[in-house]
Amino acid sequence: MCRSKAPEPYDVNSTDKKCVPSGGEDIASVWKLWSASRGDEELDPQLSLEGLTPKKELDTDQTSTENRSAIMEIVSNNPILKSFLAGSLSGTCSTVMFQPLDLVKTRLQNPSPVAIGTAASGASTYSTGSMISIVGRIVQKEHIFGLWKGMTPSLTRCIPGVGLYFMSVDVMKSHLISNEPSPLQAVAIGMSARTLSGVCLIPVTVIKTRYESGVYNYTGVINAFRIIYRTEGLRGLSCGLLPTLVRDAPFSGLYLMFYTQTKKLTTDWQKSSLSAPANFCCGIVAGIMASIVTQPADVLKTKMQLFPQKFDGMHSVVLYVYQKYGIKGYFKGLVPRMLRRTLMAAMAWTVYEQLTRSIGLK
């Protein structure tokens, strides 16, 4: 009896017909191909000589291709889905690029010395520190990737949140008004769209804020969700909803108003190759103006979400910030937030405008 080692792979050019390795149908298929190559018998119709690929696999690949084509056809024929996907993609790009600014803003607004490694007896570094010093401390203690801490909850919030926002804006603009929105209509559309996405995603916003602060030692998004729900219940997952809406809804409404009005000044550029830079510049102007107006609400929201047991409601947070920091306390973290919100919104709207043009929404 001739013994054969397991093929590595089996040599179909071997002339030793007696030494056929056992192994079931796969080995039998290889033997049929070997025989066909020598002209001994007709090639099995269930096999493809090219690459020894069974027809079953070819049929599976063809089915997958057909499924992808069907999905693309559904997307191409659904403008609402198009706007959602375009918004999600634009939100992803802007979030990844400007996450460090959001982290620095959260650390600036957090008075806990634990977050930045200062002595417990000393005054909070956030009270006197600058953006540069906080960035330096983060890099020193958490390395360069520490600047992107909280990226997972940020993306978890922004991908569906920004997509839902742009989808809502597109639906309201196409169904409720016939032409370009007036200033008041733009404010109403922006506030309504942001309120919808803000309410839906407030649990992720809470987790993101705590994750970035450095006060809580969560190991991940799921871990944070379980701990907050177990210790604080639904109230903990929705704390800060009111100041979040007070901050985000007016910001989005004002931003959309300023953005649409400044775009009217760049009508000639919109029809040229300079449309993207023009949209970005309009977004910068709109973001700066909207950020200044809504900054106090951002400070109050951060306090409530970091220390929910400390405050009974929004009025107690307002008094606490004023008594401890004065009027300037309501504008803590303005610079990094203004940079981040302005650049993120400008980038998101620029990418969204270009994508919607390329996929036929405009």
Image (cartoon, grey):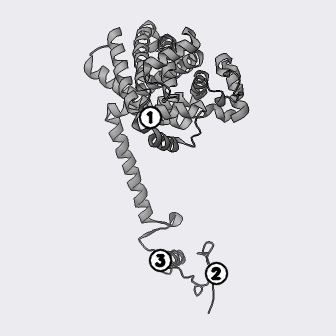
Precedes in sequence: disc 1 or disc 3: 3
Q: Can residue 86 be seen in this view?
A: no
* Residue named by callout 2: 5
Label 3 neighbourhood size at 10 Å, few (<14), some (14-19), many (20+)? few
Rendered image quadrant of residue 146: top right
Farthest residue toward the right? 140
Residue at disc 2, secondary structure = loop
| Left-right relation of 171 to 304 | left
Residue at the spot 31% in from the left edge and 34% down from the top edge: 78
Identity, as a three-letter code, of the amino acid under mark 1: Gly
Q: Which is nearer the eye, 346 or 103?
A: 103
Q: What element carries label 1?
A: helix
State the residue at coordinates (41%, 32%).
238
Residue found 36% across the figure and 19% down from its top: 191
State how far apart marks 2 and 1 are (Cα).
64 Å
Query: On screen, 224 above or below 28?
Result: above
Residue at the disc numbered 1: 236
Lower position in the chain sequence, tag 2 or tag 3: 2
Residue of label 3: 25
What amino acid does circle 3 point to?
Glu
Q: What element carries label 3?
A: helix
